[in-house]
Image (spheres, rainbow, N blue to C red):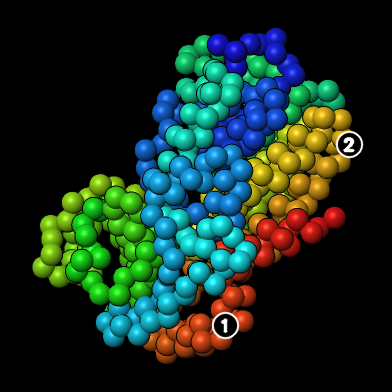
Amino acid sequence: MAGLNPSAHERVIIVGAGPVGLVAALRLARANIPVIVLEAADLPHAEPRASTFHPPTVDLLDELGLGERLVALGRPARTWQYCMFETGDRAVFDLSVLAKDTNHPYRLQCEQLNLVIEAGKMLEAEQPGALVHKADVTKVSQSETGVAIDVDIDGEKTRLEGLWLIGADGASSVVRKDLGLAFDGETYPTTSISIGTPFPFEKQIDGLCGVNYFWADGWSFSMFQTKNMWRVGYSPPIDMDDETAVSDQEVQSRLSRILPGAGPFEIVTARLYSVHRRLVERMRVGRILLAGDAAHLNSPSGGFGMNGGVHDAFNLTDKLIRVWNGEDNSLLDLYARQRHFAASADIQKTSDANHKRHREKDTGKRMAALKEMQDIIADEAKAYKFLRESSLMDSLERANAIA
């Protein structure tokens, strides 16, 4: 297997085969740079996880031939809304106003698993054997001239060496922890739950968009429509234990509050997760670079986590390819500055505001927020600006402008 050749030092080692790691690997492979991707799991994670691709992210993925594939596997959502569930008062945003700036003026609702599978196939075609599952990284080290990792691959311990290392191994990143980097921030007091069901809500509830944020009596919830199911998200009561929160009885009860009398609902997935806002102190330490959730975490409100990670991968590989071909490696410091800024100034700030707004319980404040959004929609220039911002278009441009 070519990817496991222990003497192949002139390569990039990538830890983590999620969207960020695989996009980075594929870009490097297309530039004829040898890569090896190490993934602890034995298969791609089957949980749906992130499902929103913003317009500039799909534009970037088009460069790899992935955009068209994901559009075919997902469901474009041209409109999205905030809505008072009981009264029907709503603010509906139309992403078609961005058509002059993007080839994809919509949110693409498509489970990230599809990106992982498709990118993995493409990587295998470029560099057979580059993706290695059941590979537990236990130690990371580096020198002035290269990097080394100790890894347990399907029960066999070995040491692999390379010239550069990308840590894209998620929130519990072994790479980040081994570097001893601070990961400052907070964990939100409430957990969130994501329910996947094929129930055809669109046939029963008038006015549904592909992406919906509802304020309802006593709670709030979201509804996203992918190609094959609806994903319903909400925060269970803070005093409810995890087992009860994901029990069939509790899940059925919640869905019945949305559509009384329609159950029982088929449940494909019920996933409970904690929500964090954290940012690593540095995204580069010598020959080791961090990207995606390994470097920054944010509330999923607005769908910025996976998108920001993919943007990391493109920015990083743009610069790493140039360094590989002879340019000064200070370019990688620029990557760290640009994407650290994007995470702190844009992604975390906006997702935190989204998180708090959607969980607002005061009716008066809900109505004020709804009125503000309705006023934005009524002003073409404001709507255009708001949608560029909420789609991470401006974030990309601001980050890339940093010297």
Name the N-terminal-most of marks 1 and 2: 2
Q: How many residues crowd around disc 2 within 10 Å: few (fewer than 14), some, or many (20 or more)? A: few
State the residue at coordinates (65%, 30%).
30
Name the residue at the right extreme. Answer: 328
Residue 102 placed where, x, y %?
A: 59, 60
Horizontal relation, residue 63 to residue 195: left or right: right
Horizontal relation, residue 377 to residue 287: left or right: left
Residue 285 placed where, x, y %?
A: 77, 38
Horizontal relation, residue 327 to residue 393: left or right: right
Q: Which residue has dot 1 on it?
A: 380
State the residue at coordinates (76%, 34%).
321
Name the front one of labels 1 and 2: 1
Q: How many residues crowd around disc 1 within 10 Å: few (fewer than 14), some, or many (20 or more)? A: few
**Which amino acid lies under the numbered mark 1 shown in the image of this protein?**
Glu
**Which amino acid lies under the numbered mark 2 shown in the image of this protein?**
Asp
Q: Is residue 157 visible?
A: yes
Residue 366 placed where, x, y %?
A: 43, 83
Q: How many numbered tags mark residues here? A: 2
The numbered disc on residue 79 is none
How far separated are the C-alphas under marks 1 and 2?
44 Å
Find out whether the residues at labels 1 and 2 contact each other: C-beta distance under 8 Å.
no
68 vs 113, nearest the viewer: 68
Q: Which residue has dot 2 on it?
A: 328
